[in-house]
Amino acid sequence: MAELNSQTDDQKDLRTLKMIVWAGLAALAVSIASGLLLLAIDPDAGSPTEAAFGISAAIGGLATGVLAIAALIYAQVKNLWRLAPTPLRVALWVLIAVGIAVTLWNLVSQPLQN
């Protein structure tokens, strides 16, 4: 019985994780569409169109980052990493390490440029 309950809980947790990932992909699509429209329309500087598309792209990008981090934390807390294939886990952790390394490099190198 505990085995069946565990599988049901895992399936529920995976559905929740998928919803978080889909929400992140939707936010990414909004961000990309806003950025492309901003480039295609090329509105005047300071115009309401530029402000709307710029803010939409920025908020979409931030929402994508927040949802991606939320999905990673959720997967860690619910121990869903054990269900993912090993190559996928390695690829995700490599991407996380690269992101952290690039962020740290930018933080260290910016003060040196001044």
Image: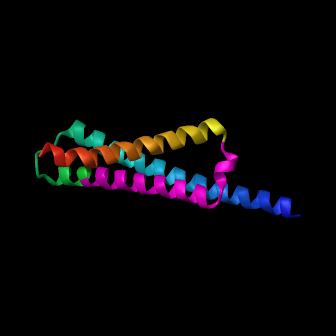
x, y percent for residue 108: 26, 47
Q: How many marks?
A: 0
Residue at screen point 20% across, 46% down: 110
Does the magenta stretch mainly form a helix, a strand or a loop? helix
Q: Foreground: 69 or 113?
A: 113
Q: Foreground: 71 or 28?
A: 71
> Which of the 4 image quarters holds residue 86?
top right
Report the side of 104 relative to 48 (left or right).
right
Q: Foreground: 95 or 52?
A: 95
Residue 44 drawn in magenta: no
Residue at screen point 54% across, 37% down: 91
Report the side of 3 relative to 15 (left or right).
right
x, y percent for residue 87: 62, 35
x, y percent for residue 38: 24, 43
Residue at screen point 47% across, 55% down: 69
From what the image shows, is residue 114 above or below residue 59? above
Residue 60 drawn in magenta: yes
Q: Which residues are magenta?
A: 55-84
Residue at screen point 29% across, 39% down: 36
Report the side of 16 relative to 102 (left or right).
right
Task: Assign the N terminus to one quadrant of the image.
Answer: bottom right
- Image color mode: rainbow
From what the image shows, is residue 41 above or below residue 80? above
